[in-house]
Image (cartoon, rainbow, N blue to C red):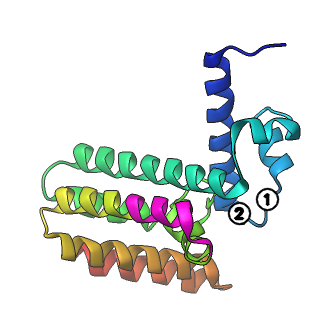
Amino acid sequence: MKVSREQARRNREAVVEAASRLFRARGVEGVAIGEVMRAGGMTHGGFYNQFPSKDALAAEACALALEGSVARWRSIAEEAGGADGAKAIVRDYLSARNRDAPETGCALVSLGAEAARRGGGMAVALREGLDGLVDAYAAAGGVERDAALAAVAQMVGAMMLARAVDDEALSDRLLAATRTALTA
């Protein structure tokens, strides 16, 4: 049965969205193509009709996740208004909710090390997403780009450590200390 172009587009979007969640939750190597396709409502056999490789899908999934993060940061800053925009971003990002939901959280944290190892399109997507987040933070806080870059790096590092430690109290302290440092 022939699928319309519109349906093919929707199918592809569903697969990329599913891959974005799964890859952030378990890493690219931790997820099989068949699992991604099933989560996107497709069969394993349709993968190569949609994507040239798993790396190509990983790049698209990473880009989609980071585009969503940039949009979220801009929305948070707009809601907060004025100079409070950057503080609102920090409070939202450095939250237990974000820490405890890697599948919907920041791709910089979940996929950063993997993008460094894989390179290629995934590393490009990560860099472009980082640029977007830094720009959103700079605009929200009215700060120069280097100050925004340092703040984003501090937030990402804190979130990565908060997820990695096996001590919830220490994890909470990492988030709280970084929130305090960036909002003081």
Give the image quarter of residue 145. Answer: bottom left
On the image, the x and y values in percent for residue 164 come to 63, 81
Q: CA distance from mark 1 to mark 2?
A: 6 Å
Residue visible at 78% across and 41% down? 47
- In the rendered structure, which segment of residues is drawn in magenta? 118-129
Q: Is residue 18 above or below residue 2?
A: below
Left or right: 39 with respect to 139? right
Residue visible at 20% across and 76% down? 146
On the image, the x and y values in percent for residue 76 come to 31, 48
Residue visible at 68% across and 49% down? 19
Magenta region includes residue 108: no
Left or right: 126 with respect to 31? left
Left or right: 37 with respect to 28? right
Residue visible at 54% across and 60% down? 121
Q: Is residue 131 above or below residue 82?
A: below
What secondary structure is marked by label 2?
A: loop
Residues packed near mark 1 inside 10 Å, few (<14), some (14 to 19) or many (20 plus): some
Residue 56 is at least partly visible in this image? yes
Left or right: 145 with respect to 42? left
> Which residue in the protein does label 2 denote?
28
Magenta region includes residue 123: yes
Instruction: Judge by depth and name the residue closer to the eye, 57 or 184.
Output: 57
Query: Disc 1, disc 2: CB below 8 Å?
Result: yes
On the image, the x and y values in percent for residue 126 come to 47, 63
Residues packed near mark 2 inside 10 Å, few (<14), some (14 to 19) or many (20 plus): many
Residue kind at label 2, given as amino acid type? Val
**Residue 47 tag number:** none
> Which residue in the protein does label 1 denote?
31
Residue 96 is at least partly visible in this image? no
Screen quadrant of the N terminus? top right
Secondary structure predominantly adopted by residues drawn in magenta: helix
Residue kind at label 1, given as amino acid type? Val
